[in-house]
Amino acid sequence: MLLTITTTYQPATDLGYLLHKNPARAQPPTELSFGQAHVFYSEVSAERCSAHLLLDVDPVGLVRGHGQPQQYVNDRPYAASSFLSVALARVLREGLTGRSRERPELANTLIPLEFQIACVPSRGGEKLLRGLFEPLGYSVDAQSLELDERFPAWGDSPYFNLTLRITATLSSALTHLYVLIPVLDDDKHYWVGEDEVQKLLRFGSGWLETHPLREEIAARYLKHRRALTRSLLAQLEPDLESVDDVNEEIPVTEPAQSLHQQRLETVLAELRRSGAKRVLDLGCGEGKLLRLLMADKQFEQITGMDVSHRALEFAEKRLKLAELPEARRARVTLLQGSLTYRDVRLEGFDAAALVEVIEHLELYRLAALERTVFEFMRPRVVIVTTPNAEYNAQWQTLPAGAMRHSDHRFEWTRAEFTDWAKRVASSFGYTVRVSGVGLEDALVGAASQMAVFTLVGDSA
Ligand code: SAH
């Protein structure tokens, strides 16, 4: 079993710090109950660095002591399976958990990564391989292995040599491999119980909740034990608090209107100005913007989307949708979905708003969000708001360095947001205008910030 990790991040040799394995030194093998694991490097330069995890499974050791005669001839020593995941967790623990003593900031940095895994069994074929990894942003290259090269007529085996490429933190990518290798194999060499549910919740946090194949992943990971799978899926709903819990104290000098209300009004004004008739509220939460949109006849079709069922239930009640006459009810649609996966139901709209949403996604998932919104949905106008991290110092109740909300994964300075907005605009053919929202401080800017993207060639 062989896993190769390559990066072209510069200096590429920093991979050694992320893996806690010095490329300049030979690593002693690690003894595992089912064999030996070796780590070595095949290429070490400032431009490119490749580390390998080689797992030497002892097939006789595996069946020894089992009392009954067992099958010696099987794929276990060679196929990438749950053994590889266990070895990953043992031997590359620091890489998996993202704890680098020497390079803590690098552990949180998105770096170009390539993974090659030899002989991956995919019970579900190339379709499953792609279905698992592509939605997470990987480019997938799967070379199918013939059953026996002397007899091509026998066709292909369920095994693949797999290459995955992504720009991500090493830890997030290793976490995906850790979970998905046994899922592809659809087997585990050990018993699964409630512990595995907890493990999957932990390692799946931030990506499994909204993965289009989450049910299949859960069932396979938990060896098709129905009760465990049900328990997992019930706990998988992302526990995102409402924006009402935001630590945005209203300073005495702030006008009576809360910052959030100002933000919503500002976004509403932009949507009006754009002339949009069919509008999307992406990450609509409990529907505060939807309510404002419903009060304005300009908006003929209003669709709110959120990943959280709970938030949508709340929105449905808050907007009293059930009590509306049929014609007015038909104007509003609430959909459960995710901003990181393409969804054809959200295509063909004039404008989309993402109010205080992007900071709830892990940074490495933003690339996926960019494509779903700007490439696939592709509305004429996209409005994005996010906190201005520089302003946080103005809130005395907010501890220094803290973020405004426990579910925020990042908060950007004005320069960071502007850079992002400009890059996205130029990659997808939009122009962009960035401005502040809310009370403005001469030094640190406004409390919140907004980018209005307009599709090039559109005069709005
Ligand atoms: N826009 C609303 C809510 C902001 S809170 C308002 O301004 O009041 C952020 C919202 O984003 C939450 O409701 C959360 O469930 C949603 N969210 C987080 N990640 C998401 C994703 N990947 N796809 C869709 N919605 C997401």
Image: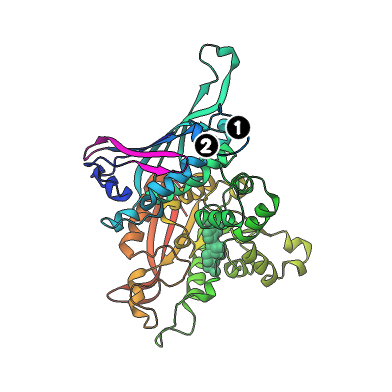
Q: Residue 70, labelled with which disc?
A: 1
For disc 1, the neighbor class at 10 Å (few under 14, some 14 to 19, many from 20) is few
Amino acid beneath label 1 = Gln
Q: Residues within 10 Å of mark 2 (few under 14, many from 20)?
A: some
In this view, the residue in front, 316 or 96, is 96
Q: Which residue is mark 2?
A: 62
Horizontal and vertical percent position of residue 459: 45, 51
Q: Is residue 17 left or right of residue 184?
A: left
Q: Is residue 111 above or below residue 41?
A: below
**Label 1 beta carbon less than 8 Å to ligand 1:** no
Relative image position of residue 120 (x, y in whole percent): 50, 33
Query: In the image, is residue 84 part of the stretch drawn in magenta?
Result: no
- Where 401 falls versus 346 (above or below)? below
Magenta span: helix, strand or loop, mainly?
strand
Contact (CB < 8 A) between labels 1 and 2? Answer: yes
Which residue is depicted at the point 60% across and 15% down?
154
Q: Quadrant of residue 228?
A: bottom right
Q: Earlier in the sequence, mark 1 or mark 2?
A: 2
Residue 251: x and y in percent read: 41, 84
Magenta span of residues: 29-48
